Image (cartoon, rainbow, N blue to C red):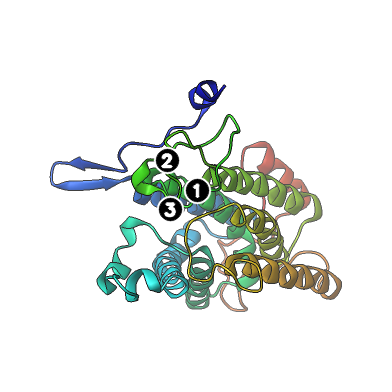
Amino acid sequence: MLAELITLSIPSPSEGVWNLGPVPIRGYALAIILGIVAAVWIGERRWVARGGRAGEIQDLAIWAVPFGLVGGRIYHVLTDSELYFGSGGNAIEALYVWRGGLGVWGAIALGAFGVVIGAKRSGIKLLPVLDAMAPGVLVAQAIGRWGNWFNQELFGKPTDLPWGLEIDAAHRPPGYTDPDLLFHPTFLYESLWCLLGFAVVVWADRRFRLGHGRVVALYVMVYTAGRGFIEMLRIDSVELEDVLGLRFNVWTSIVLFVLALVYFVVSARRHPGREEQIYVDGRRDDDVRSEPSEEQTDEQTDTGQLPG
């Protein structure tokens, strides 16, 4: 039976880095880059469907991406500081982003701050553009999680399920020495959850014409609902392992879910419907379209565009 399970297991890549001459190509970096490209592409199509000008999401990404990478790394280093500044740690390795270690909460927080800067400079209203970009972030997270597979990191508890993940001995935490052990592929769980969340958020936006930041709030609720559960499966060592009985990231998911839910409900009561203006007064030029009608949105959907 065990042999059959191993046959059905998910293998981990033997190498996460490939050398193209003197240039190392890292699977983790590729996953992050592909995720960013997907998020920008989806956000661009949704923004144009909302009446925005083509190319503006790419412009905002110039601000959001570097801020997001820095924020993700800062969050990781702060919540796992012992890895770099504790006994046996090497502080310089806090800068080694290519080895993995990007905290999603820090990436989203500072990435959004980058969008704030870019939107203000471009005369774009913040909530409409964040609503346009949010679903694409779920796809970026779904793709980016495969970087953990390449690095053989952030996997879950041992399992005898046929989709158990093979992990080399060098990448296992202490105490998991049985060579036949398989582990929950939490990277895959989160990737699939994010794709499902993308479908749910886009559907809800089309069905209810969400606005005023409610797409963002729904994104947060969907993501944290899955992340909180998946986080409890993981066995990687973290500094804040037990905060009132739960991992710090589980508490973060719970708090953010509640805050997003409250915002969603309050916003729906105070600002029903969707914004008609997506640019600040005086910004919109003659060639910038206004919010498309429902008939126009249906036509865009039929031709493959993602509505806002």
**Is residue 228 among the parts visible in the rendering?**
yes
Q: Position of residue 97 (x, y in %)?
A: 33, 62
Nearest to N terminus: mark 3 or mark 2? 2
* Residue displayed at 66% across by 53% down: 226
Q: Are marks 1 and 2 in contact (CB under 8 Å)?
A: yes
Q: Residues within 10 Å of mark 3 (few under 14, many from 20)?
A: few
Quadrant containing the C terminus is bottom right
Which quadrant of the view contains residue 95?
A: bottom left
**Is residue 306 among the parts visible in the rendering?**
no
| Residue beneath disc 1 | 155
Q: Real-space Cα distance between discs 3 and 2?
A: 10 Å
Which quadrant of the view contains residue 269?
A: bottom right
Which quadrant of the view contains residue 1?
A: top right
Q: Tell me the kind of residue under disc 3.
A: Pro
* Residue displayed at 28% across by 67% down: 93
Q: Is residue 20 left or right of residue 161?
A: left
Q: Residues within 10 Å of mark 1 (few under 14, many from 20)?
A: many
| Residue beneath disc 2 | 167
Q: Position of residue 145 (x, y in %)?
A: 49, 49
